[in-house]
Amino acid sequence: MPIAIVNKQSRHRIDRPAIRALVSGILDDHNRGEAEVTVVAATDAFVHRLNLAYRGVDAATDVLSFGAPARSGRRAARRAADAGPEPVLGDVVVSTDRAAAQARERGVPLRREMLALVAHGVLHLLGHDHERAVDRRRMALLERRYLRPAPKGSR
């Protein structure tokens, strides 16, 4: 499964192996282990521009998810059915500036906050949301589960 990690900022160190392992685990758990995901670590300014361009929100945010466009038309639907699940799931863009500020506020390491935001973004790509209270609880449970350290001896 191709997991690309793109670093578009230079202020904060990102833990590529941890991000890759997290995304891989979430995808495997959702039976999407072959899906392609790109994680982008970016500045607040970069995320702000994306948020304005794609969501009409004139502000930075901590994480954005962009699902790959679905195939359309009868022929494309037939090809998709033959090929199985769509190989490209989408992109997750994390503001490292926002992650650093939130980590300080919460008293957690930046690495943990980054992983939490990546998990949140990937869950969105997989169709989870937090519009209703029940969905917020489910998504929060999933995020906590994926951020739990692996038991000793399992690595």
Image: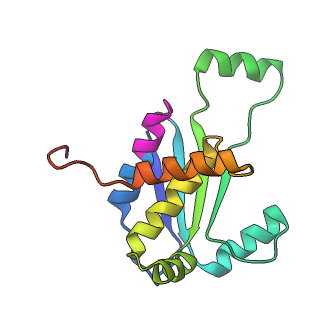
Q: From what the image shows, is residue 121 above or below residue 85?
A: below
Residue 90 visible, this angle: no
Q: From what the image shows, is residue 20 above or below residue 93?
A: above
Q: From what the image shows, is residue 53 above or below residue 28?
A: below
Q: Position of residue 140 (x, y in %)?
A: 55, 53
Q: Residue at x 50, y 47 (%)?
A: 142
Q: Position of residue 115 (x, y in %)?
A: 44, 62
Q: Nearer the viewer, residue 49 or 144?
A: 144
Q: How is the rendered protein coloured? A: rainbow
Question: Relative to 41, is 1 on the left or the right?
Answer: left
Question: Relative to 52, is 150 on the left or the right?
Answer: left
Q: From what the image shows, is residue 75 above or below residue 103?
A: above
Q: Nearer the viewer, residue 122 or 109?
A: 109
Q: Residue at x 60, y 41 (%)?
A: 126
| 154 falls in the magenta region | no
Q: Position of residue 51 (x, y in %)?
A: 75, 68
Q: Position of residue 147 (x, y in %)?
A: 40, 55
Q: Nearer the viewer, residue 105 or 120?
A: 105
Q: Residue at x 74, y 49 (%)?
A: 132
Quarter holding residue 18: bottom left
Residue extent of the magenta highlight: 24-34
Question: Relative to 106, is 55 on the left or the right?
Answer: right
